[in-house]
């Protein structure tokens, strides 16, 4: 009976010792899971938002509004150095308007349809700020190069009256991403783009002395990946 | 024979909503094809009226 009691005590001690040794291992695993990954993180996103053009008078005259919906997407690669990441994305805004004549500052629509389309390609580098207290919320800031595609086509166009060109500029972006799950998140960001000298050599942009094809945009994203 | 052409052009502009006489005159002068010395001169005035250029108007950057 005494031997049985001793065996029982030893068994209990062995189980406790095993659990005591196993707990730190489990804790290590948990720590490893919650710690931010230091490897390369790849993700993609779909984006929708609103772009307000800097050349407001020109777009207002032709399209009847100086802002419009943008749709796009891209890919982000988180680099293994702190919060550094690179991003490549593109979006499009296309709208229909009509050609006008400006006389004494007054705009007269002429009923000739014109289609304006801007398609920028944005290459950014930035930093994600991770906070231990708010692991799901990831603010970020980035800056980069913009290659702005501009297309203008209209009915009954003669030689040189339609255009399809690309111009260089820069952008600044900032916002925050909220991770719903480990692989899915939503983000909001504010971006400022400048593309000086892209317009202003003809059309209403010359009449209004506006040469910047940039503007400010508010964007919402759905992100997939880490 | 200038008067009928200019009157017809003015009518086209009015049809597009440009009804102010001053605006019609400004449109004709603005888009006229310059002749002779650059700008207005006593021989050709502002040049030849150009209904196509005027009624085609301006795009955003073109």
Image (spheres, grey):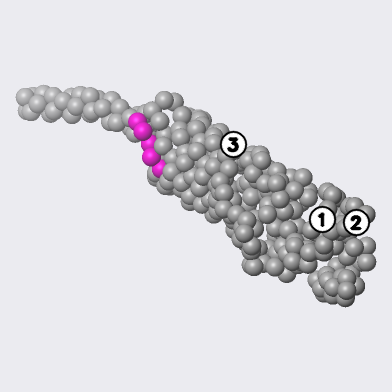
Q: In the picture provided, is A142 more to the left or to the right than A58?
A: left
> Per the image, is A41 magenta?
yes
Same chain letter for marks 2 and 1 = yes
Q: Quadrant of the N terminus of chain A?
A: top left
Instruction: Residue at 9% x, 26% y: name it.
Output: A7
Residue labelled with disc 3: A170
User: Disc 3 sits on a residue from what chain?
Assistant: A
Residue A30, disc? none
Image coordinates for residue A26, horizontal then vertical, percent: 28, 31
**Residues at circles 1 and 3 in contact by the CB criterion of under 8 Å:** no
Circle 3 SS class: strand
* Residue B62 falls in image quadrant: bottom right
* Residue A112 falls in image quadrant: bottom right
Circle 1 SS class: loop
Packing grade of label 3 (10 A; few <14, some 14-19, many >=20) is some
Residue labelled with disc 2: B43
Magenta region: A39-43
Same chain letter for marks 1 and 3 = no
Comparing labels 3 and 2, the label whose residue is closer to the camera: 2
Q: Earlier in the sequence, mark 2 or mark 1?
A: 1
Residue labelled with disc 1: B35
Image coordinates for residue A65, horizontal then vertical, percent: 72, 57
* Residue A93 falls in image quadrant: bottom right
How far apart are the alpha carbons under marks 2 and 1? 9 Å
Packing grade of label 1 (10 A; few <14, some 14-19, many >=20) is some
């Amino acid at each position: 009976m005494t031997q049985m009691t001793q065996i029982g005590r030893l068994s209990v001690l062995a189980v406790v010792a095993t659990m005591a040794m196993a707990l730190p291992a489990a804790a290590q695993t948990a720590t490893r899971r919650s710690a931010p990954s230091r490897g390369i993180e790849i993700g993609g996103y779909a984006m929708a938002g609103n772009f307000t053009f800097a050349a407001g008078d020109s777009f207002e005259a032709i399209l009847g509004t100086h802002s419009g919906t943008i749709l796009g997407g891209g890919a982000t690669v988180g680099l293994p150095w702190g919060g550094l990441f690179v991003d490549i994305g593109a979006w499009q805004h296309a709208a229909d308007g009509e050609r006008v004549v400006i006389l004494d500052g007054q705009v007269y629509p002429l009923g000739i349809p014109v289609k304006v389309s801007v398609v920028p390609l944005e290459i950014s580098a930035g930093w994600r700020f991770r906070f231990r207290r708010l692991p799901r919320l990831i603010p970020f800031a980035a800056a980069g190069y913009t290659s702005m595609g501009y297309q203008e086509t209209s009915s009954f166009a003669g030689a040189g009256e339609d255009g399809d060109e690309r111009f260089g500029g820069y952008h600044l972006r900032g916002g925050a991403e909220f991770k719903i799950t480990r692989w899915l998140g939503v983000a909001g960001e504010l971006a400022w783009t400048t593309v000086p000298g892209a317009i202003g050599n003809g059309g209403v942009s010359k009449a209004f002395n506006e040469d910047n094809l940039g503007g400010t945009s508010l964007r919402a994203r759905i992100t997939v990946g880490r | 024979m200038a008067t009928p052409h200019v009157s017809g052009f003015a009518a086209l502009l009015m049809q597009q909503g440009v009804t102010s006489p001053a605006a019609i005159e400004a449109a004709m002068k603005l888009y006229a094809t310059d002749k002779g010395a650059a700008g207005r001169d006593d021989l050709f005035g502002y040049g030849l009226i150009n209904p196509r250029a005027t009624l085609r108007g301006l795009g955003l950057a073109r």
